[in-house]
Image (cartoon, rainbow, N blue to C red):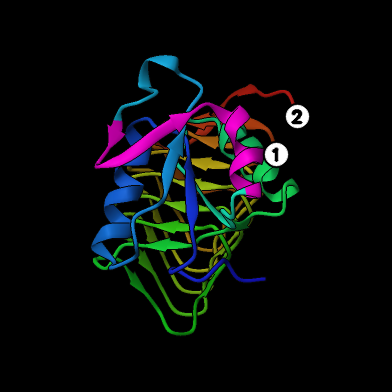
Amino acid sequence: MSGVSPDSDCIVLGGGQHAKVIIDAMLSAGMPPPCGVLDCEPNLHGRRVLGVPVLGGDEQLESLVRQGVVGFVVGVGSIGDVTARRRVHQRARSLGLAPVTVRHPAAYCSRTAGIGPGSQILAGAIVNTEAEIGENVLVNTGAIVEHDCVIEPHAHIATGARLAGGVRVGAGAHVGAGAVVREGITIGPGAVVGAGAVVIADVEEYVVVVGVPARKLRKLAA
């Protein structure tokens, strides 16, 4: 299933720092500005994020759907935990909204790569030949996803991370800023690869690995 057409009305869910980056990417790509932003922080209500008004909290979402909003963009970032991004995405989906895919014009995506609905490919990122990017994946600024990689839904490939060919990243996993993952490695669902880590062996699900070479630091709750 693809995301909505860029000329459809959409709302940004989350009004923090990541929302600024996403709105900037949308405008840089020539997409119409979103009709508004929703954020649970009352101090943001009535303000603007790059010119887009913050209309209120999440409780406004159902009303906006009735008013004709049909698409959404996740404006929530993640630092080692994608839970909030996943939750926001799934709630919007449950209300019938369609995820809008955002690709910065300074990103490179191979014509043979698959980009899932609601994914975000930011400036300087590379998604190479026959890579597969799942739904609601964030490939952050300057990250490299090499040929034949598979990134499952809700995962985050953070700023400057580099995945060599044929890497598989499980659903909801996080690959930290500047991390390097050797070719053919599998990173399990829900795992967290620390910033700057060098991964040379498979990573089991729901663990944190750090260091050079990466080693298990602790187990996470599934």
Image position, residue 205 (x, y; %):
70, 39
Horizontal placement of 134 versus 75: left or right?
right
**Residue 109 vs residue 196, the one in the foreground:** 109
- Which quarter of the rendered picture does the C terminus lie within? top right
Is 172 situated above or below 150?
above
**In the rendered image, is residue 196 in sight?**
no
Q: Characterize the local packing of mark 1: few (<14), some (14-19) or many (20 or more) Cα atoms within 10 angstroms.
A: many
Please identify the quarter of the rendering in which residue 176 is found: top left
Furthest residue to the front?
Answer: 67
Image position, residue 175 (x, y; %):
47, 43
Q: Which residues are magenta?
A: 48-66
Q: Which residue has dot 2 on it?
A: 222
Q: Are marks 1 and 2 in contact (CB under 8 Å)?
A: yes
Is 37 situated above or below 160?
above
Amino acid type for the residue under numbered disc 2? Ala
Horizontal placement of 60 versus 5: left or right?
right
Furthest residue to the bottom?
Answer: 111
Horizontal placement of 115 versus 139: left or right?
right
Distance from the alpha carbon under mark 1 to that under mark 2: 8 Å
Q: Earlier in the sequence, mark 1 or mark 2?
A: 1
**In the rendered image, is residue 32 in sight?**
yes
- Which quarter of the rendered picture does the N terminus lie within? bottom right
**Residue 57 vs residue 186, the one in the foreground:** 57
Determine whether the residue tagged by mark 2 lies in a helix, strand or loop: loop
Residue at x 53%, y 66% (from the top left corner): 149
Q: Which residue has dot 1 on it?
A: 205
Image position, residue 189 (x, y; %):
68, 44
